[in-house]
Image: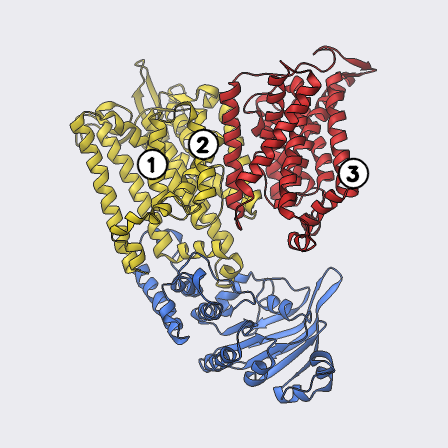
Amino acid sequence: MLELHKVHKHFGGLQAVDNVSFTVATGCIKGVIGPNGAGKSTLFNLIACNTPLSSGSIRLNGREIQGLKAYQTAALGIARTFQNIKLFSGMKVLECVMVGAHTRGRAGFLAGMLPLPKHRREEAAIRDKSMACLEFLNIADLAHSPTDALAFGQQRAVELARALAADPQLLLLDEPAAGLNIYETAELGRLITTIREQNITVLLVEHDMSLVMDICDEIVVLSSGRKLAEDSPTNIQRNPEVIAAYLGEDHEPAR
Amino acid sequence: MSLELFFQYLVAGITYGAVYAVVAVGFNIIYNSTGIINFAQGEFVMLGGMIAISLVQWLPLAWAIAAAVALTMLIGALMELCCIRWLRQPSILQMLIITIGISILLREGALHIWGEGIRSLPYFYGDAITAWTFGPVRLSPQVVWVLLACGCMVAALHLFFNRSTLGREMRACAVNRTAAALCGIKTRNMVTLSFVLSAGMGALAGCMISPITYTQYDSGAALALKGFTAAILGGLGNSMAAVAAGLLLGILEAFSITLVPLAFQDAVAVSLLLLILFIKPHGLFGSSAVARLKAF
Amino acid sequence: MVGQMRTSQAKLGLLVAAVVLVQFFTSITGTEYYLTQLTMAAYYGLVVIGLCALMGYAGQISIGHAGFFAIGGYISALLTTYDLTPFAASPVVGLLKQAGLLFTWENLYGESLLTCAPWTAGLAAITVAALVALVLGVPVLKLRGHYLAMATLGFGTIIYRMVLALPAFGEADGISQVPGFVLLPAGLLSPGAIMITGESNLRIFNYYVAWTVLLLGLLLLLNLMTRSRSGRALRALHGSEEAAEACGVDTSRAKLQVFVLSAVYAALAGVLLTHFNEGIGPEEATVMKSVRYVALVAVGGMTSLWGALIMGVGLSFLSLRGVFGSYDDAVFGLILLAVMLFAPGGLLQLSNRIPWRRLWPATRHRQS
């Protein structure tokens, strides 16, 4: 469903992403790993259209998304979370998640000032959907708490709920396990597999090896902006190049 | 336009421009150390002039100016100590509004102390019609004073930031406050110092220009807007560019009289500001990448 | 959120009751002259709540809203006082007259004038303000923080310079002898015309008109901010623009919309107040006025339309009564400074911390 073809991105003289091509099949969980500075986050920002490509193409369901604005990709069904969590301060959790469902509504600015029955129904639908997302993540009890008052793990969960509220086809997770302990990470892994069962394709950038190896169907390894390997988790673990570049000389292949 | 008229406009432009440059540098010093735009910057210029005018009744001119500068520096220090220093993680909006509040209070305070009347310092040498003539150029001694004072201030500041330890510490704070604090620099004191410095510079410029432009309780607001225009023209945070931009603005404004009515003279600077903000918010001389590097 | 709705309905009811009670009280005690300032204060309140939507909710500062107020007031004043009689023969004027866009009235000196009808003039003025906001907003709203503040300040300054320098706008004198804003022509409900005007026999009526406009304005904004998709998007972009974009919010469009909306509020207030005062002067366009609106939003608590309304009307009323004397501007400066230093959440927020407040059923806390 997502195809990257010869994607280049340079900042000045620095090649951040260099000739990267891969595809993500519908309904699969794909991981992107690589050492620090390998270009993972840049790649993510390219897919989310936060930064323009230098050359190459990115297609979603056959449609070129290069040159679109970030908010337009959301309408196409790409939802994302952020590495350094970005919730909307000053809002309640439920409201925050309802913003995630922004693309599901149509009511305009003027309609918002006059609560017509049609738009009230739309609002109710958005609220129900958002509540369902909170329930799915077992944080329905937080619905009316202010976002500023949440613990770190809860903030991650709310961000995930916000992304899910958009009913995305493709979910981009930027280091979802960062800052979580082993139990929370394991829980997150289960959650991501459940999300996939809802017919949502998942692309995640992650540092946590155990999570990536456990849940991903396929893994892309980046190093210095170039694609080093693309394979199943088991093969990646055996790939000597990957071990040298990413895990380092003094690391045993993970488990 | 005759050659004499041309030079007359040019000299006037450079004189005003020098003051705009000093105000712009004052903006930059505080911007670099705190990341805020001090809306009360123009009021420092007004206060310097007003205090000196009051003191000159009792003191010799030089002493009156020195005392005025010292007092304005004190006000600058108090402003930082009372209103900025103890805020924890204030938002930009909050600090912006605080400096707006202070500028109003200073202006209104001046109104109640000195009234609405227009005042001025006596000419430092000669009087309003004394002039030195160099060919087509007629130069009032006061203009020389303004240019000398502003030039010396900018030069001294340049030396201070590049040669002295204290200046280097201030630059360190501007670049990375946390890292500077970790190196043992008392970053908060540096912020106070930046307010003191820019208050002093503004006050001195206010004294120098007072015989030419006169001083009134509300003359700070227009100066602040023009100083800010110069700061933006040069790229916010870049003081040497701001000096060039200030002079450029002064000259443009002076020559604009030939094209637009006097009543719109202020609007010229403001339109320029809007234009720059819309087209090149990082300044004439900078790119967005350079603009992030703060330089005194 | 149902609770929220109920609370705001209760608050609205209280406010309406207060408005009516104040009118009765002044009628009984023979202090109806207070209503004049309360009417004016209500119009200023309209500017303040519009600015509150922009500043508090969308997080975009404007130090140029007096400019929009002045655009509204001045254009309406100009169009309703510019005598078209010399051009009465021209086909354009004839056409406008037939379309009902013009009207004839007598000024203080008994001269008969043919000018734009207030409805036409007011609509034209508001349209111009909205267009200016649109044109200004596209580049300005790309700026952040200081740049935005300075750009709007620059806009305000230019408007001030224009009304002060252009003879058409009366220079330092402004425009006077502006006719009343006729809402219902004479003979329809009452023998005289019902209009927005400073005439003392219509004082009570005008008081209610101003408050109706203000409360309607508030209601629309409350709907927008608390119960709509667009309002939610605005508050979201205040929190994080990048995340809002990722959620599909077109942030530049949303900012532009609320900027234009708040400009329309300011211009509407300008139009109505100008007809009520029967004139407008350059002091309405000063930067200090813009700063004052910002102060009123801040003291109301930034993100509180209610706070903005109460503080906006209350302090404007005191200022109009001359309570602050020659310290008027200083008081607003002090308010700005004090609120930002000691109560960034606004004065009303501060009162929540006072113990006696617990005696009152705190609906805010209960529903969360």
Describe the element under mark 1 as helix, strand or loop.
helix
- Which residue is the site of mark 1? C313
| Extreme residue toward the right, this view | B135
Residue A220: horizontal and vertical position, in percent? 64, 79
Chain ID, yellow in image: C
Chain ID, blue in image: A
| Mark 3 vs 2: CB contact within 8 A | no
Q: Residues within 10 Å of mark 2 (few under 14, many from 20)?
A: many
- Image-quadrant location for residue C126: top left
Chain ID, red in image: B
Q: Residues within 10 Å of mark 1 (few under 14, many from 20)?
A: many
Residue B116 appears in view: yes
Marks 1/2: CA–CA distance? 14 Å
| Residue kind at label 1, given as amino acid type | Val
Give A65 or B69, whichever is nearer the viewer.
Answer: B69
Describe the element under mark 3 as helix, strand or loop.
helix
- Which residue is the site of mark 2? C289
Pointer 1 and pointer 2 on the same chain: yes
User: Left or right: where does residue B266 sit relative to residue C220?
Assistant: right
Marks 3/1: CA–CA distance? 53 Å
Describe the element under mark 2 as helix, strand or loop.
helix
| Residue kind at label 3, given as amino acid type | Leu
